[in-house]
Amino acid sequence: MKTYYVYMITNWTSEVLYIGVTSNLEKRIYEHRSGIYKGFSEKYNLKKLVYCEDYMDVNEAIAREKQLKNWSRKKKDVLVERINPEWKDLADG
């Protein structure tokens, strides 16, 4: 059974957030960090994983991703700060 992850990454100053979904979080963070794919995350240097949730159903993960993308920045910040108050990079260690 696969696990799907809804995640948020940001830049080192936490100015910009990106929300995505993947079935391989480790690989996806590597892709963001190495700049393999040109686009939003590469343009804004988004490499710090600050939040993630896991799901067993891909449709639930996609629905959650869409829900979070529609939230205000303030509401997203509160969500991150509940589990990661210092906005540390969760992919380190």
Image (cartoon, helix red, strand yellow):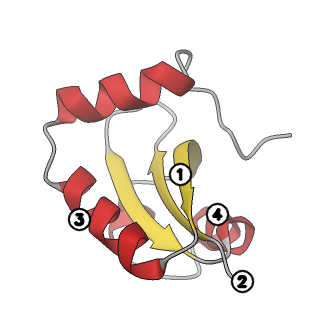
Q: Quadrant of the N terminus?
A: bottom right
Q: Are dots 1 and 4 in contact, CB under 8 Å?
A: no
Residue drawn at x 31%, y 43% as measured from the top left: 16
**What mark, if any, has residue 29 been given in the picture?**
4
**N-term-proximal mark, 3 vs 4:** 4
In front here: 33 or 74? 74
Q: Which residue is mark 3?
A: 66
According to the image, label 1 marks what residue?
53
Q: CA distance from mark 3 to mark 1?
A: 13 Å
What residue lies at 23% left-to-right and 65% top-to-bottom?
Answer: 66
Asked whether 81 or 86 is in front, the reply is 81
N-terminal of the pair, mark 2 or mark 3, is: 2
Q: Nearer the viewer, mark 4 or mark 2?
A: 2
Neighbours of disc 1 within 10 Å: few (<14), some (14-19), many (20+): few
Distance between the alpha carbons at the discs numbered 4 and 2? 21 Å
Looking at the image, residue 21 lies above or below residue 88: below
In this rendering, position of residue 2 left or right of residue 20? right
Mark toward the viewer: 2 or 3: 2
